[in-house]
C-alpha cells in the first residue's frame, strides 16, 4: 500500500537526480510522452502529454472565474427509477457533455443507489480479471483533525469487514491466487482512494467470492477499536520509513509551491498528532461522509463476458444503502500572488533548503487556478500543442546541457496538480556552485521560446515523435493488459476526463496536424509560462551560499533570450542508408529448432548465436536483447568505477559516424531504444521496437559492438552526475542498502560496490574507452528476437549486422573473478545513514549458491522465502507493528556457481533491530524444526502458480528464462519444469531446504543505524 500522492511525486526532481536524457531515445520515449500526464505524475519531470488510451490531448483554458468548490463527476439522474444498469446506453455517464468518441469496448452503467461502474472484456493476460474500486476522496477531503484518515481507512478496510475476519485478508486473497502487494493493493492520494485486485485464473466461483470480499471491505468495514489499535502502529511505521531528507524536501515543496492552499498541508500519510488522536468514532465519521455508493466507481477489465462482470457489480453493490445527501466537496483553493507582485512576472514565495546529502536541485513553478473543463476534441487538440511546445523546449534545454552548460539536466513539464493548480514546472540540476548561471541559462532558453516561434522543422520533429507514441497503442491494442486499462480509466475519473480508443486518439492527432504551426506553438508556449504566481524551492548542499531573497531576485531579473539552442534548419540529413557497413554480410552456418515452442537457433561462424521466435499474437511489438562480454565478474577490480558510468556514457558516446544529436535525429519518428544493463556475467542491450524498425535497431546494437564511437562529453556528464548523486545514498537506511548490500553479500568485492566520488574523479575518458572497448569486443554474443516480425527479413538483417561482426574472443575473466561470500557471524556489520534518528534497517543473510544446474533448487528457495516473508510480515508488521514492509528474497546467479543468498530485510526504529534479528532467527529455526502446514504452503504456491501461468503468456517471460541458453542448452529444458518446481513442493522439502541453508551460524548480519549511534544489537549467546 502507498500514500504517494501526485503532490508528493512532484519531488522526483528534488529527491533524486533527474535521469539524464538517453541519447537518440526520443522516439522510444515518445510513447511515454503520449503516455503521460497521469494525475500522479511528477511535476518537474518531462511528461508532456497524456496516455493515448486515456483520451486525446486537451485545449487548456488557463483563466476562469474563481470557484468555491471543485466540481464533481456529474450525477446522472435516472429517468425510470429502476435498478437496471444502463448497459449500452447511447450516452454513457463518462461522456456526457463531451464529443470525445466513445471507447465502445467499455460498458458503462449506474445503479439506483448512485454507484457508477464500467466493465470490459480483456484477455491479457488470459484468465485474469482486474477490479478497481475508486472512492472519490483523498487527503484533501480531510478536515484538520482528520489528517491521515483517508490513508488510515485504506488500512483498516483490509483489517476486518463483513466477510473478512480480523487479520485474515492477506490469506483470503492468497487462497484466490492473488499475491499481496502486487495483485492485491490500494493507493491513497490527495484526491482519491483506490482498492485494487488482479484476480488470476478467474472462475465464476472465484469472481463471486472476490466481489463479495471487496464489496464487504468498502461497504461494511468493522472500523473497531481493535482494528485501530492494530493498524495505527503500521501506519506510523510507514510514516517513519518515509522520513529523512525526502520528507523534509517534500514538506518544503508543498508548503512553498502550494502556499495558501490545502495541498500545502495535506500529505496523505497525515501527522503523528492527528493519527494518534484518532478514535473509532472519528474515523467512522470520515468513512460515513465519503464512503457512499454515489461517491464510488467500480472498474472491471478482464477475461470474462461484460454482462457477467456487470452481474457481479449489481449483485454485491446494488444493496448498498446510505442516508442523507452526499457532502459537498471541500474547496481546494487557488494559487494567489502576493500583494504588489509584478503582473508581468509575479514571483511569490521562494525558499532555500539546505540538504548536504542531496544533489543541488532547483524547482520553480508558474501556477494558474485549476478549473474543470469539458473534455472535448478541441480541449485535447490544445493539449497536443502544449505537448509539442514542451518537447521543443526540453530538446533545446538538453542541447545546451550537452554542449557543456552550467546545469547537468533541466526540463519543463505542465501538470494539473491534485485539482488544486494548473502548473508549469521547471526542474534544474545545477553543475557546481553557480546556481545563478544555471537558472539564468535555463530561463534564457525558455525566454527565446516565448519570444519567437519555433521553426516548422522543430515542430515536425516533435510531431513525428508523438505520432509514433500514438501509433504504438493502436498496433499493440490486442496486447494491452486489463490492469492497465482499468488503471487508465481510474486516472481519467480522477482528473475528471474521459478515455478514448487508441485508434480515435491517433486519428484526432493526425487530423489536427494542420494546427501545429509555429504561431500556434508560440501561443501555447506563452500560455505555459504565464500565470497567477511563480514560486521556487532550491535544495542546496551548502549553507550560506544563497538566500530566499536572492532566489526571488534571480527569478525576477530580466532575461535576454538565448536562441543558440534552436535546431539548425540546414543540418545535413542523417540516414541509415549512409552509415558504414559493419562488415561483409555472412549467412548463418546452422538454423535449427530448439524443441521449445517455435523458437529457433541460428549460429554464425563468428560465434554469434541467435534465438528467433516470431509471434503474431503480439502485434506491433518486437523485443531485442543482446548479451555480450563477461559482465561484472570479467572486470578487473581497478576498473570497477567504470561500471557505474556506462549506463549513460556508453550509449551516449555514439557509434559509427553518429554522435548524440545524430542518434536523436536518425531515430525521429521511429520506435527504437538502447537500454543497457550490467549483469554478473554479461552485459546486455535491450530495446522494444516495431517490425518496420527491427533491421535498423539491429544495426544500432551491432554497430555499438563493432564500430563504437568515443565522444568524451557523455562520459564527463555521467561522471558529474555520479559524483553528485553519491551522497544521496546516505540520506536513508534504504539508500545505504542500495549502495552497499550487494558489496557485502559478495564478500566486499570492489566490482560489486558503488564507486565513491574520489574513485569517480580518478576515472578518465581515456580509461573509459580502454575498459569498454575491450568489453564490447570480447565474449560470446547472444541475440534474442521475440515478437511480431518476419523471420526471413529478420535473418537478412542479422546477416548484415551481427553476422558481419568480427569473430568474438572469450571474455577476459579477471584474476579476482571468483565471487566470495561473507563468513558467518553474529556480530553485525554496522553502517550509518544521515537521516532521521528514528530510522534504521536490519539485514540477515544466508549464503546459498548459484549456477544453472541448481535452477530447480533456486525456484524452491523462492517458495521458502515466500513462506519466510509471510511469517515475518505477520510478526513484525501485523503483531508487533514495528516494521511496515519487512520482506525476504532469494538471489541465485545462474551464470555463476557462487554468490547466491537468502536475505531478510526490515526498515524499523533503532530500538527494534534486536527484535528483528530475534524474530528472523526464530522463524528460521522453526522452519528447520517443523515443516510448514499444507495450508500455509498453499498460500504461497497458489499465487506462484498464477504468477507463472500469467507470465508465460508473454514472450518476455521466455526471453528472461532463456538468457544464456544458446551456450547452455540445459536452460531450455528447465522451462518445462518451472511450474512444477514452484508448485509441486512438499512441506518436508521446505524443511530440508531450511535445514540446508538457514541453520544456526550460517548467517551474517548488517545494520544501518543513524549517524552517531552504535550497533542496535549484540551477538547471540
Image: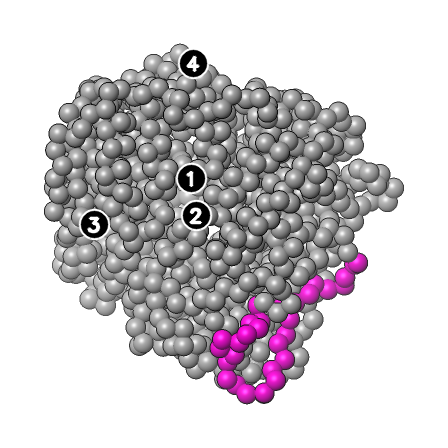
Q: Residues within 10 Å of mark 3 (few under 14, many from 20)?
A: many
Q: CA–CA distance between discs 4 and 3?
A: 42 Å
CB-based contact (under 8 Å), mark 4 and mark 3: no
Quarter of the image with the C terminus is top left
Q: Which mark is residue 764?
A: 4
Residue 145, given in percent of the width and then of the height, sits at 66, 63
**Distance Cα–Cα, label 3 vs label 1:** 35 Å
- The residue shown at (51%, 61%) is 489
Magenta stretch, residue numbers: 65-94
The residue nearer to you, when weighing 653 against 829, is 653
Sequence-first disc among 3 and 2:
2
Of residues 527 and 38, which is closer to you in this image? 527
Query: Eyeballing the image, is 82 above or below 992?
Result: below
* Residue at which label 1 appears: 671
Badge 2: how crowded within 10 Å, few (<14), some, or many (20+)?
many
Q: Disc 4 on helix, strand or loop? A: loop
* Residue 59 % position (x, y): 66, 52
Compute the Cα span from label 4 to label 2.
40 Å
Residue extending farthest to the top is 766
User: Looking at the picture, how far across and down is residue 172, in whole percent?
Assistant: 34, 70
On the picture, is 206 further left or further right than 808?
Answer: right
Q: Is label 2 in a helix, a strand or a loop?
A: helix
The reply to whether the C-beta atoms of the residues labelled 4 and 1 are less than 8 Å apart is no
Residue at x 33%, y 28% (from the top left corner): 699
Q: Are marks 3 and 2 in contact (CB under 8 Å)?
A: no
Comparing 48 with 221, the one in front is: 48
Is residue 527 shown to the viewer in this render?
yes
Amino acid at each position: 500500500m502507498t500514500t504517494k500522492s501526485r503532490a508528493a511525486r512532484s519531488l522526483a526532481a528534488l529527491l533524486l537526480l533527474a535521469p539524464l536524457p538517453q541519447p537518440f531515445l526520443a522516439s522510444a520515449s515518445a510513447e511515454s510522452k503520449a503516455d503521460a500526464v497521469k494525475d500522479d505524475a511528477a511535476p518537474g519531470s518531462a511528461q508532456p502529454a497524456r496516455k493515448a488510451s486515456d483520451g486525446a490531448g486537451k485545449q487548456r483554458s488557463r483563466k476562469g472565474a474563481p470557484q468555491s468548490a471543485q466540481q464533481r463527476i456529474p450525477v446522472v439522474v435516472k429517468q425510470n427509477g429502476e435498478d437496471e444498469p444502463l448497459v449500452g446506453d447511447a450516452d454513457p455517464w463518462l461522456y456526457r457533455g463531451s464529443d470525445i468518441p466513445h471507447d465502445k469496448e467499455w460498458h458503462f452503467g449506474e445503479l439506483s443507489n448512485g454507484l457508477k461502474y464500467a466493465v470490459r472484456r480483456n484477455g491479457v493476460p488470459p484468465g485474469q480479471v482486474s477490479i478497481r474500486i475508486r472512492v472519490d476522496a483523498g487527503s484533501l477531503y480531510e478536515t484538520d483533525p482528520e489528517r491521515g484518515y483517508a490513508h488510515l481507512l485504506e488500512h483498516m478496510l483490509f483489517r476486518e469487514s463483513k466477510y473478512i475476519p480480523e487479520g485474515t485478508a492477506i490469506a483470503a486473497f492468497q487462497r484466490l491466487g492473488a499475491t499481496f502487494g502486487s495483485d492485491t493493493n490500494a493507493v491513497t492520494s490527495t484526491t482519491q482512494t483506490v482498492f485494487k485486485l488482479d484476480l488470476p485464473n478467474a472462475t465464476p466461483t472465484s469472481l463471486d467470492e472476490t466481489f463479495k470480499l471487496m464489496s464487504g471491505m468498502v461497504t461494511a468495514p468493522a472500523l473497531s477499536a481493535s482494528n485501530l489499535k492494530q493498524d495505527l502502529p503500521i501506519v506510523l511505521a510507514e510514516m517513519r520509513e518515509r522520513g529523512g531528507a525526502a520528507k523534509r524536501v517534500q514538506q518544503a515543496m508543498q508548503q512553498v509551491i502550494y502556499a495558501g492552499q490545502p495541498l500545502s498541508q495535506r500529505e496523505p500519510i497525515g501527522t503523528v498528532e492527528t493519527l494518534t488522536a484518532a478514535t473509532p468514532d472519528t474515523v467512522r465519521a470520515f468513512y460515513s461522509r465519503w464512503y457512499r455508493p454515489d461517491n464510488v466507481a467500480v472498474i472491471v477489465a478482464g477475461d470474462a463476458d461484460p454482462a457477467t462482470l456487470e452481474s457481479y457489480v449489481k449483485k454485491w453493490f446494488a444493496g448498498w444503502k446510505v442516508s442523507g445527501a452526499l457532502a459537498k466537496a471541500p474547496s481546494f483553493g487557488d494559487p494567489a500572488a502576493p500583494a504588489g507582485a509584478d503582473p508581468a512576472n509575479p514571483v511569490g514565495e521562494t525558499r532555500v533548503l539546505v540538504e548536504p546529502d542531496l544533489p543541488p536541485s532547483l524547482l520553480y513553478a508558474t501556477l494558474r487556478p485549476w478549473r474543470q473543463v469539458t473534455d472535448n476534441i478541441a480541449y485535447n487538440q490544445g493539449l497536443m500543442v502544449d505537448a509539442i511546445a514542451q518537447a521543443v523546449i526540453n530538446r533545446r534545454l538538453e542541447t545546451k546541457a550537452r554542449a557543456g552548460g552550467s546545469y547537468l539536466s533541466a526540463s519543463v513539464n505542465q501538470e494539473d496538480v491534485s485539482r488544486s493548480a494548473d502548473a508549469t514546472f521547471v526542474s534544474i540540476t545545477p553543475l557546481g556552485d553557480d546556481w545563478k548561471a544555471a537558472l539564468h541559462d535555463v530561463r534564457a532558453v525558455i525566454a527565446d521560446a516565448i519570444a519567437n516561434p519555433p521553426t516548422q522543422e522543430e515542430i515536425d520533429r516533435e510531431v513525428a515523435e508523438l505520432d509514433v507514441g500514438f501509433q504504438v497503442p493502436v498496433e499493440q491494442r490486442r496486447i494491452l493488459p486489463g490492469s492497465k486499462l482499468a488503471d487508465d480509466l481510474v486516472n481519467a475519473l480522477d482528473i475528471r476526463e474521459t478515455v478514448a480508443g487508441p485508434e480515435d486518439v491517433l486519428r484526432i492527432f493526425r487530423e489536427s496536424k494542420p494546427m501545429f504551426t509555429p504561431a500556434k506553438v508560440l501561443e501555447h508556449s506563452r500560455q505555459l509560462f504565464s500565470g497567477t504566481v511563480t514560486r521556487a524551492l532550491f535544495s542546496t548542499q551548502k549553507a550560506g551560499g544563497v538566500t530566499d531573497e536572492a532566489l526571488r531576485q534571480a527569478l525576477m531579473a530580466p532575461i535576454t533570450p538565448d536562441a543558440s539552442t534552436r535546431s539548425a534548419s540546414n543540418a545535413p540529413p542523417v540516414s541509415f542508408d549512409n552509415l558504414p557497413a559493419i562488415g561483409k554480410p555472412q549467412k548463418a552456418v546452422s538454423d535449427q529448432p530448439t524443441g521449445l515452442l517455435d523458437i529457433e537457433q541460428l549460429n554464425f561462424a563468428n560465434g554469434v548465436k541467435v534465438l528467433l521466435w516470431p509471434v503474431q499474437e503480439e502485434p506491433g511489438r518486437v523485443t531485442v536483447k543482446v548479451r555480450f562480454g563477461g559482465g561484472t565478474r570479467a572486470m578487473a577490480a581497478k576498473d570497477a568505477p567504470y561500471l557505474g558510468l556506462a549506463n549513460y556514457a556508453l550509449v551516449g558516446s555514439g557509434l559509427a559516424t553518429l554522435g548524440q544529436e545524430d542518434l536523436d535525429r536518425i531515430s525521429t519518428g521511429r520506435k527504437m531504444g538502447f537500454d543497457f544493463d550490467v549483469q554478473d556475467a554479461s552485459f546486455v542491450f535491450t530495446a522494444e521496437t516495431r517490425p518496420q524498425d527491427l533491421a535498423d535497431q539491429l544495426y544500432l546494437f551491432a554497430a555499438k559492438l563493432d564500430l563504437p564511437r568515443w565522444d568524451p562529453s557523455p562520459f564527463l556528464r555521467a561522471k558529474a552526475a555520479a559524483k553528485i548523486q553519491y551522497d544521496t545514498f546516505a540520506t536513508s537506511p534504504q539508500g545505504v542498502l542500495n549502495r552497499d548490500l550487494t558489496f557485502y553479500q559478495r564478500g566486499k568485492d570492489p566490482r560489486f560496490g558503488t564507486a565513491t566520488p574520489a574513485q569517480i574523479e580518478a576515472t578518465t575518458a581515456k580509461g573509459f574507452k580502454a575498459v569498454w572497448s575491450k568489453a564490447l569486443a570480447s565474449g560470446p554474443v547472444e541475440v534474442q528476437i521475440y515478437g511480431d516480425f518476419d523471420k526471413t527479413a529478420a535473418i537478412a538483417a542479422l546477416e548484415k549486422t551481427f553476422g558481419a561482426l568480427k569473430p568474438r574472443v572469450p571474455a577476459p575473466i579477471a584474476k579476482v573473478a571468483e565471487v566470495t561470500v561473507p563468513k558467518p557471524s553474529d556480530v553485525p556489520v554496522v553502517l550509518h545513514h544521515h537521516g532521521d534518528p528514528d530510522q534504521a534497517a536490519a539485514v540477515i543473510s544466508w549464503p546459498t549458491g548459484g549456477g544453472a544446474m541448481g535452477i530447480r533448487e533456486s525456484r524452491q528457495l523462492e517458495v521458502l522465502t515466500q513462506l519466510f516473508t509471510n511469517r515475518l510480515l505477520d510478526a513484525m508488521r501485523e503483531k508487533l507493528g514495528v516494521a511496515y514492509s519487512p520482506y525476504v528474497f532469494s538471489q541465485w546467479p545462474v551464470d555463476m556457481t557462487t554468490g547466491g543468498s537468502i536475505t531478510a530485510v526490515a526498515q524499523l526504529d533503532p530500538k527494534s533491530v534486536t527484535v528483528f534479528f530475534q524474530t528472523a532467527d526464530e522463524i528460521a529455526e522453526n522452519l528447520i524444526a517443523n515443516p510448514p502446514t499444507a495450508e500455509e504452503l498453499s498460500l504461497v504456491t497458489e499465487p506462484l502458480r498464477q504468477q507463472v501461468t500469467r507470465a508465460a503468456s508473454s514472450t518476455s517471460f521466455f526471453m528472461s528464462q532463456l538468457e544464456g541458453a544458446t551456450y547452455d542448452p540445459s536452460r531450455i529444458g528447465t522451462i518445462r519444469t518451472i511450474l512444477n518446481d514452484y508448485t509441486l513442493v512438499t512441506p518436508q522439502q521446505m524443511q530440508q531446504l531450511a535445514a540446508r541453508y538457514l541453520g544456526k551460524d550460517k548467517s551474517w548480519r548488517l545494520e544501518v543505524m543513524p549517524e552517531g549511534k552504535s550497533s542496535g544489537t549484540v551477538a547471540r549467546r
